[in-house]
Image (cartoon, grey):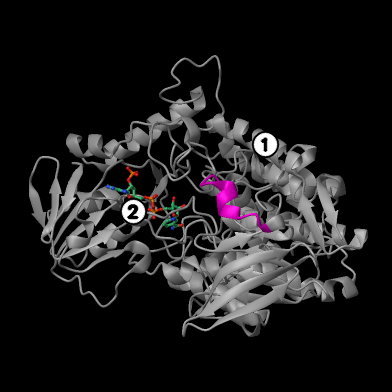
Amino acid sequence: MPDGSAPLDGAYLREALTHAHHPTLAIIYVHLTGDTRFIDDPAYQPEYELINGDPDGGIAEDAKKVLRDAVADAMEKYAETGKLPSPPDRATLQKMMDYVATDHIPDEYFDFLSLELPLDGEDKRMPGHGIDIPSDWAADHKMIIIGAGMSGLLAGIVFQSKGIPFEIIEKNPELGGTWYENTYPGCRVDSPNHIYSYSFEADHEWPNHFSTQGHLLRYFQKIADKYGLRKHIRFNTEVTGAEYHDDNQTWTVTIKSKDGKTESLTSRGVVSAVGQLNQPAYPEIKGRDTFAGPAFHSARWDHSVDLKGKKVGVIGTGASGIQLVPEIAKEVGELRVFQRTPGWLAPTENYHDALTSEKLHLLRQIPFYQMWYRFFLFLSMGDAPLLYLQIDPAWKDFDYAPNAEAADFRKQIEDYITEQAKGDKALAEAVTPDFQISGKRSLRDNGIWLETLRKDHVTLDTGNIREITPKGIITEDGEEHEFDVLIYGTGFKAQDFLFPMTVKGRGGQDLHEMWDGDGRAYKGVTVPGFPNLYLMYGPNTNIVVNASIIFFSESEAHYMTVLMKMMADAGVHAADIRKEVHDAYNEMIDAANAQMPWAYAKANTWYRNSKGRVAQNWPLRLIDFWNQSRDEEPDSYEMLK
Ligand code: NAP
């Protein structure tokens, strides 16, 4: 465990500050002194590059030294007195936010963003904050949550805070969801950890900017323990079905434990928190079951198989493949990587970097540092990247990029790939996508991807796979490549929301029959005909370029409390989204998605379902999702008695 607990003072304080994100320090100085001189001074205005570049936004070294000395002096004073000036007023806070954003933040964002900054003594970050649900109503509104991953645990925390009884059903022997199941070598989060954590549960202990799977799992375990959630979780138990009863507005949830025992539970509502990426997809390749050696999926890693010195074939170069290949390349004898479509790389210099002990000190001990650093990440990954997705009707080269800024960005990434290929033109060509950026999720890279593919014992194979045989893989050119082990980095059946459960709503309507492979929901959460069925990370709530998925789950959890208050106000225990409201919402989402590269780019992607519709992604701004999770709208729902 990294240690940031030693006292932060004297020479060590001054040394630690050299590790700081300096624009964050300029903000901290306002908190420590009330003085805005650094954020007002043009010499301290950061300007960030599109790709990598100086994390401090180009602030000059001598200016940074002046800033650090001023912060160190102010910190020493604070250590003596223990007193800070009063929190910044509205105008100063706006100025601070604008400084971090390097732009003026419009008024409509102020409430949304200031939620991240609990400066007035009231922490409003917990979803459901400010939503008053009467305790007698809450006590009679038991919920079943399916899944004890990031979203399910969050739902439990929020229900607990509202006095709503709940039970979490988890098919695995441990909580953590995706961070429990994906144990492949090299697995790590690809959103920075200081925003890939609950807003109300900051962690100063992340060992990396992008931590590895074990640390993510431990974070969620720690949170579950802190909130006493384990006693509410039934492990090793699967939900096989859920059925709504019109006569008494309850649900029966059928569960099956590992030993085959089944049981029926009764609840007022059901939360599906099973995620979009929990059913491994195996490729439909002739002879797939005939391979004689060990063969397994990235999300079902077989740790009993020793890869040392072996001939290994990996199919797939998506987010999982690109993480596991560099790691196993360190030990295998020969590695052949089958790439059907290359993904765009997202150059990220600090992708594998550990947080220095000095950085950990700053996060833990400088007042407000962690909060503003998270805010900086939140803004830089917030709505700003959407600029690169907007279609400019006047822009001529649409096949290359939707607008001039996006074209410039794509050119910079192409140059990065060429540079990484170190003169190997064929390699650069093979790994450069021919579709628009954001047609698929970009893959974080610190140089390790092409460094791995350039190794003598690693071969990138771009030939189509014709067949899998007992010995290995035959490619279209007829050549058979023999392997000891085959690994499928071939993704997930993301479109199969709630698969394989049977879910029946009003009048016995079957959810999967109704969806017919095209899952839809209102605000990603509610489905007409299925009162009190709430989806978390449901249809059209995935992100491609902005934020962290936890932001979405927090908004969804908040929305559930809004709906519960609405029911309590109406004196009912069931509400059903009106079909016409749901349909109009989905039309709006479909129209917005049609403008996005993930809809029109000529790339294979799990974002589009078998009907060609984008059923996964959120196409609008974060603030739009946040706002819609706060709307009270009793007219949109039918209240059921
Ligand atoms: P994926 O993005 O769907 O990639 C699957 C890969 O398998 C693609 O390269 C695909 O090629 C290839 N493939 C599938 N069928 C094939 C076939 N028949 N022949 C040859 N190649 C085939 O899956 P993933 O890498 O597991 O990632 C899924 C999602 O999980 C990501 O988008 C991300 O949201 C999430 N994820 C996140 C992290 C993280 O946070 N660190 C890590 C892993 C995954 P095509 O492109 O041609 O289809």
- Answer yes or no: is residue 69 visible: yes
Residue at the image position 60 percent from the left and 73 percent from the top: 254
Q: Position of residue 10 (x, y in %)?
A: 60, 73
- Mark sitting on residue 214: none
Could you say where residue 263 lies in the image, as x and y percent from the top left? Answer: 60, 81
The numbered mark, 1 or 2, whose residue comes first in the sequence reads 1
Q: Nearer the viewer, residue 159 or 372?
A: 159
Is 36 drawn above or below residue 640 in the view shown?
A: above
Splitting the image into 4 quarters, where does residue 202 fall?
Answer: bottom right
Relative vertical location of residue 64 with respect to residue 8 in this rendering, above or below: above
The answer to whether residue 355 is left or right of residue 504 is left
Q: Nearer the viewer, residue 549 or 490?
A: 490
Q: Which residues are magenta?
A: 508-519
Picture coordinates of residue 594 (x, y %)?
55, 30
| Quadrant in the picture for the C terminus | bottom right
Mark 2 Cβ and ligand 1 under 8 Å apart:
yes
Of residues 248 and 325, the one drawn nearer to the viewer in this rendering:
248
* Mark 2, secondary structure of its residue: loop
According to the picture, the residue beneath numbered tag 1 turns out to be: 103
Q: Is residue 531 magenta?
A: no
Does dot 1 land on a helix, a strand or a loop? loop
Residue 512 in magenta stretch: yes
Q: Which residue is mark 2?
A: 490
The amino acid type, in three-letter code, at marker 1 is Asp
Label 2 Cα crowd, 10 Å radius (few <14 / some 14-19 / many 20+): many
Evaluate if marks 1 and 2 touch, with contact meaning CB atoms under 8 Å apart. Answer: no
Q: Is residue 35 visible?
A: no
Residue drawn at (68%, 67%), measured in percent from left and top? 155
